[in-house]
Amino acid sequence: MTIKEYSTYDGVDLGELVRSKQVSASELLETAIAKTEALNPKLNAVVTRFDDQARQAANAPIDGPFSGVPFLLKDILGDYAGIETRSGSRYLSGQPALVDSTLTARFKASGVIPFGKTNVPEFGLLPTTESLLYGPAHNPWNPDYITGGSSGGSAAAVAAGIVPMAHANDGGGSIRIPASCCGLVGLKPTRARNPLGPNLGDVMSGLIQEHIVSRTVRDTAQMLDCTQGPEIGAPYAVTPPTGPYRDEVSKPVGKLRVAFTKTDIAGNPLDPECTAGVEKTAKLLESLGHHVEETMPDLDQNILSQSFLAVWASGLAMQVEAVTMFTGKAPGPDDIEPLSRALLEVGQNTPAGQYLLAVAMLQDMTRKIALFQQTYDVWLTPTLGKPALPIGTIDVRNGNLEEAMAPVMDFSPFTAVMNATGQPAITLPLHQSQSGLPIGMMFAGRFGEEDLLLRLAAQLEQAAPWKDRKPKIWA
């Protein structure tokens, strides 16, 4: 199979080609490796390779809907036995994982062949992928711009055609932000839909969820079938799906009540190109028979920002304290980036009572949005407040937290809300800037209703297809 042919298929198609013996898993893997070697010097998307283990897996018996499909794990929570996970940090000095994470095991059971790990910001803290350990990941649509974060390496690899889909996770937008920047489908599932074990039950009071970024809705749906479901001892539970998510993409969605928003939560204007995207998408939804209404839930931006920061920074402090406990090594002055260290100090100085108050404030916001969505099936916003930023806009070397984080609030005003609430949200590549950068549109559903989001996403994929819209690097 040629590289050009390989990149035209999604994961479902490639798996079917392997199962019907039209191509071998080894052929696909060698094609993906060749494409990595050709493109990664320009993208810096893949930071760790384990080709030999992948070749052994490709030559072994394989089963599953994604039989033999090349795949990349994220360098955060993508534990693969015998391979290090560094979370983009110089502080984590290459201890190999003892076992696969539960999610990695489920990925492998789906038939995919992991062969590398992808670039991330340090500890996954930022909506850009520019760590001092790995250097910046470059957007396939324009290498001077960010891929988003924290799953930026995964998004760059998928958008460039190296793999049809890749592991991603999301604690404040880290699936949806890079999917928007790179023109992909990015679903953050409902809290507890996918597992975090065996080493973790919860991260940051339920903020973090796992899944993938992909080029097609059906790959996102099919992989959710392969990975979803509770594991022993999980701290949260969610209602099981009524049937396979893969089947949802061929079902009619019906007539939905859609709320759409074209300011940030505080009522401030967004970038005009993002506003144009949400207005265009609202008109498209109306043309498809949906009831569309401009409105949003009554939320307090200051409470959201302060509460989220307390939980987020405390989560970082927990990670650092855990590493110190298990390794006996406290971080030295140059082990953690200046911006990360500023966030770490916030976490270390957040009292337990303040942390629990922040959790309570986020839970109150959850109830408000849940009540809002008793009226509206879906809440539509631009995924981001601006198109992808130039690399270097968010300066990880700046230890002044207020200065360094100032660009983040305008860039990503919506995504963290859905982590606080635990509800599912999906970004779709429905718009582009005048300069050609992708601009995603985000649809938030009710808790547990990924099925409805996938039906709507499939309808929009058919009505406004993005399959043939590719960056120049693709060729």
Image: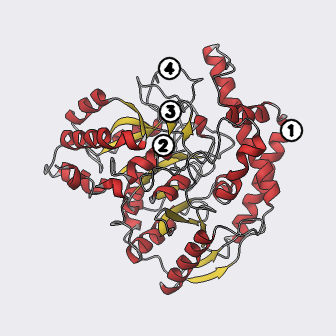
The residue tagged 2 is: 137
Whether label 1 touches label 2, CB < 8 Å: no
Task: Name the side, left or right, on which 176 lies relative to 163.
Answer: right
The residue tagged 4 is: 95
Task: Name the side, left or right, on which 96 lies relative to 409.
Answer: left
Of labels 4 and 2, earlier in sequence is 4
Of labels 3 and 4, earlier in sequence is 4
Q: Is residue 233 above or below residue 416?
A: above
Question: Does residue 206 appear in this view?
Answer: yes
Of labels 4 and 1, earlier in sequence is 4
Q: CA distance from mark 4 to mark 1?
A: 34 Å
The residue tagged 1 is: 353
Q: Residue at x 69, y 24 (%)?
A: 321
Q: Is residue 368 above or below residue 352?
A: below
Q: Residue at x 75, y 45 (%)?
A: 403
Q: CA distance from mark 3 to mark 4?
A: 17 Å
The amino acid marked with disc number 3 is Tyr
Q: Is residue 348 above or below residue 415?
A: above
